[in-house]
Image (cartoon, rainbow, N blue to C red):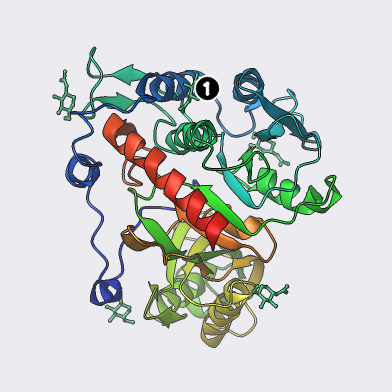
Amino acid sequence: MKLSSLPVFLLGSSQALGFEFQKPLGVAQASASAASPSDTPPSYRDELVSLHKSLVEISSASGDENEVGNFLVDYLTARGFVVQLEFLPPSTNESEPTKPRFNVVAWPGPDTHPSPKVLVTSHIDTVPPFIPYSQNDTSLDADTVIAGRGTVDAKASVAAQIVAVQSLLNSSSIQDDDVMLLYVVGEETQGDGMRFFSDTKGKMDPPLDIKAAIFGEPTEGRLVCGHKGIFGCDITVTGRAGHSGYPSLGKSANEVLMRGLVRALDTDLGSSEEFGNTTVNVGILVGGVAANVIPEKATARIAGRVAIGPESDGGAIVAERLKEVLRSVDETAFGFDCKYGYGVVKCDCDVEGFDTTTVNYGTDVHNLEGNHTRYLYGPGSIFVAHGPDEAIKLGDMETAVEDFKKLILHALES
Ligand SMILES: *[C@@H]1O[C@H](CO)[C@@H](O)[C@H](O)[C@H]1NC(C)=O
Ligand SMILES: *[C@@H]1O[C@H](CO)[C@@H](O)[C@H](O)[C@H]1NC(C)=O
Ligand SMILES: *[C@@H]1O[C@H](CO)[C@@H](O)[C@H](O)[C@H]1NC(C)=O
Ligand SMILES: *[C@@H]1O[C@H](CO)[C@@H](O)[C@H](O)[C@H]1NC(C)=O
Ligand SMILES: *[C@@H]1O[C@H](CO)[C@@H](O)[C@H](O)[C@H]1NC(C)=O
C-alpha cells in the first residue's frame, strides 16, 4: 500500500459488525495459517519460496522497477505465459532513474488475443530503503519467518498469486482464457502504473472487459470490505510583518494557521459507521523568519483519510469542508492547493470462508476504472510493511495461495 498511508486501524464501530482487531505479526499470524501446514507441506512450497526470494532479492523501490520487471517477464515466459510489457511514458524529471519502467501483463499461452474474465494484480515496487532477504530457519516449515524489504508489501502477494494461478491451471480448474496477471509499477507513490494500465486497457486487442479484479496487498489474510479515501492540501497563510512588541500592527500568519488547523482537527469533517472519522495529519508546518518578527507567511502540508463516499468525490467534499473551517477563522488569509483524491473505496467481501476487515490505507483499487467486482486480499501484516522489521511467515504465504485460488474460482463462478 501507499507510503502516505499509515497503519490500519480497525474502527471502533466495526467491532459491532463482527470484525476482529488486527494483531501484530507473530500473534495473529500463526493461528491464521491453514490447518497445520507444517504437517503436510504443499507441493508448491519450494517453488513459492524460490519465486518470493528472487523477487525480494531484487531491489525495486518505486521508480526503479526495471530489473524486477525483467525477472518476472523471464519467469512467466519460461512457464508458458504470454507476456506483454506495458511501458510508461519516460519521466521528464532528470533526477529520476532513466531505466524504462513497465507494467507486466501476462496470461496463460498460447492465445495472443486473450479475453480474460478475472484480473489478478498487485505491485512490484516497494518503499525504500532496500533490506536484504533473510530466513530465520535453514529447514523450511510453516513457521519459518522470511524478512526483507517487500517480503510483505507486496511481493508475498505477487508470489502467492502466480503460484495460485499455476496451480489452478495444473489441475485444470481454470481455462487459459479465464485469468490475466498484472504487476504494476509505482503503487507506493503516485499509482501511475495502475492508472496507465487503466487508461490503456481499452486499446488492448480485444479491449479488456473483465468481470472481476483481485488486488493483492497485505491484509493479514482477510478480505477487505473497503478502505478509506484520501485527500491532501498545501495551505498557505499570508499575514503582515511587524515588530513583535506591537502585535496589533501586523497579522501573524502562524497564529492564523494554528487557530485554523486546531479548529479543523476538532471538527467532524465526515464520518461513517463503517469507516469511522475522517482524520487529518498535519505533516509539515513552516512559518516565520525570527522570534521577534510577526510572521508574514506560514504554510502547512496536510494529508487526510476520508471516511465518507462517494468514491468519486468524497475527497473533494472533505477538502471543501476543511477550507470552510479554515475560512471561518480568517476569511481572506488562507490559500489552498488541494489534491482531492477520492472517497471511501468499497470492495466485495461477501465470500464464504473469509474473515473480513476494513483498512485505512490507500491502494490501487481506485486507480483501475471500470465496472468490475473488486476484491482486496493478501498475506502479511500492514504493521510491519514499510518498517525495518518487514517479515512474513511462510505458512501465511501458503494460506494465501489457497485463498487466492478460492477467490479466483469464486470470481469466475459469480
Ligand atoms: C524529481 O525527482 C526527485 C527524486 O525523485 C524529487 O525529489 C523531485 O522533487 C522531483 N522534481 C520534480 C520537479 O518533480
Ligand atoms: C523462526 O521464527 C518463528 C516465529 O518466531 C519460530 O517459531 C521459529 O522457531 C524460528 N526458527 C528458528 C530456527 O529460530
Ligand atoms: C505446475 O505444473 C508444472 C509442470 O508439471 C510444475 O513444474 C509446477 O511445479 C506446477 N506448479 C504448481 C504451482 O502446481
Ligand atoms: C470520532 O470523533 C468523535 C469526536 O468528533 C469521537 O467521539 C469518536 O470517538 C471518534 N471515533 C473514532 C472511531 O475514532
Ligand atoms: C455495472 O454493472 C452492474 C451489474 O452488472 C449494472 O447493473 C450496471 O448498470 C453497470 N454500470 C455501468 C456503468 O455499466
Asked if 357 appears above or below 397 in the picture, the reply is below
Count of marks placed on residues: 1
Name the quadrant of the C terminus: bottom right
Q: Answer with left or right where residue 352 lies relative to residue 217.
A: left
Seen from the viewer's position, the closer of residues 309 and 315 is 309
Q: Answer with left or right where residue 196 lies relative to residue 230.
A: right
Q: Where in the figure is residue 390, as x and y percent of width and height? A: 34, 33
Residue 195 in sight in this render: yes
Residue 243 in sight in this render: no
Asked if 118 appears above or below 402 in the picture, the reply is below
In the picture as drawn, the residue positioned furthest to the front comes out as: 172
Image quarter of residue 391: top left
Image quarter of residue 108: top right
Seen from the viewer's position, the closer of residues 136 and 406 is 406
Seen from the viewer's position, the closer of residues 341 and 125 is 125
Image quarter of residue 100: top right
Q: Secondary structure at mark 1?
A: loop
Q: Residue at x 50, y 75 (%)?
A: 256
In the picture as drawn, the residue positioned furthest to the top comes out as: 138
Q: Where in the figure is residue 335, as x and y percent of width and height? A: 66, 71
Q: Where in the figure is residue 47, as x and y percent of width and height? A: 43, 21
Q: Amino acid at mark 1?
A: Ser
Q: Which residue is mark 1?
A: 59
Query: What is the crowding at mark 1: few (fewer than 14 residues within 10 Å), some, or many (at least 20)?
Result: many
Q: Answer with left or right where residue 329 lies relative to residue 236.
A: left
